Image (cartoon, rainbow, N blue to C red):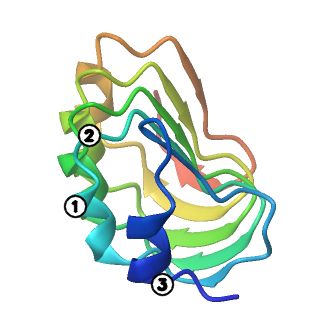
Amino acid sequence: MELTPQLLLTRVEDHRLNLGYNHHCGSIPPEIGQLVSIKELTLRNNQLSGNIPPEIGQLAALKELFLNDNQLSGSIPPELGQLSSLEGLFLYHNQLSGSIPLEIGQLTSLKYFSFDKNQLSGSI
């Protein structure tokens, strides 16, 4: 099942969007940036591909981001560094490449993160 903008915008419950473990495929639509009040975004364990949309950086209330166990590629968008409330960032087991953006170091609320099982380079 493809992850469509309509599916994203209609499945939010109690400031959470949990579409993990559903065999969703395709890319994450940029319309995800419209979910500005969401606190937890779970898209883990699907078959999502393509880049992480920079629009995720607009989710100012976001505390937990689970994009792990997909087929996401490209670099980690520096816009994720705008998520000042983020406490957990899970990007492991994808096909991400490049270096971890310096902006991630500005996430002072970040307590938990995992980027392993990607093709990332450089230092943390």
Residue 24 found in image quarter: bottom right
- N-terminal of the pair, mark 3 or mark 1, is 3
The answer for how far apart the CA atoms under marks 2 and 1 are is: 9 Å
Do the CB atoms of the residues marked 3 and 1 lie less than 8 Å apart? no
Residue type at mark 1: give it. Gln
Residue 95 found in image quarter: bottom right
Report whether 9 appears left or right of 64: left
Residue type at mark 2: give it. Ser
Which residue shows up at 29% across the image and 11% down it? 108
Which residue shows up at 35% across the image and 33% down it? 62
Report whether 41 appears left or right of 70: left
Are there few (<14), some (14-19), or many (20+) residues within 10 Å of tag 2?
some
List x then y, in percent, for residue 32. 33, 64
- N-terminal of the pair, mark 3 or mark 2, is 3
Residue type at mark 3: give it. Thr
Visible residue check, residue 101:
yes
Which residue shows up at 40% across the image and 33% down it? 39
Element type at mark 1: helix
Are there few (<14), some (14-19), or many (20+) residues within 10 Å of tag 1?
some
> Which quarter shows the N terminus?
bottom right
The answer for how far apart the CA atoms under marks 3 and 2 are is: 19 Å
List x then y, in percent, for residue 17. 52, 50
Q: Which residue is mark 3?
A: 4
Q: Which residue is mark 1?
A: 34
- Is 85 situated above or below 52? above
Visible residue check, residue 52:
no
Residue 102 found in image quarter: top left
Element type at mark 2: loop
Which residue shows up at 72% across the image and 56% down it? 20
Q: Which residue is mark 2?
A: 37
| Numbered mark located on residue 14 in the image | none
- Is 36 situated above or below 45? above
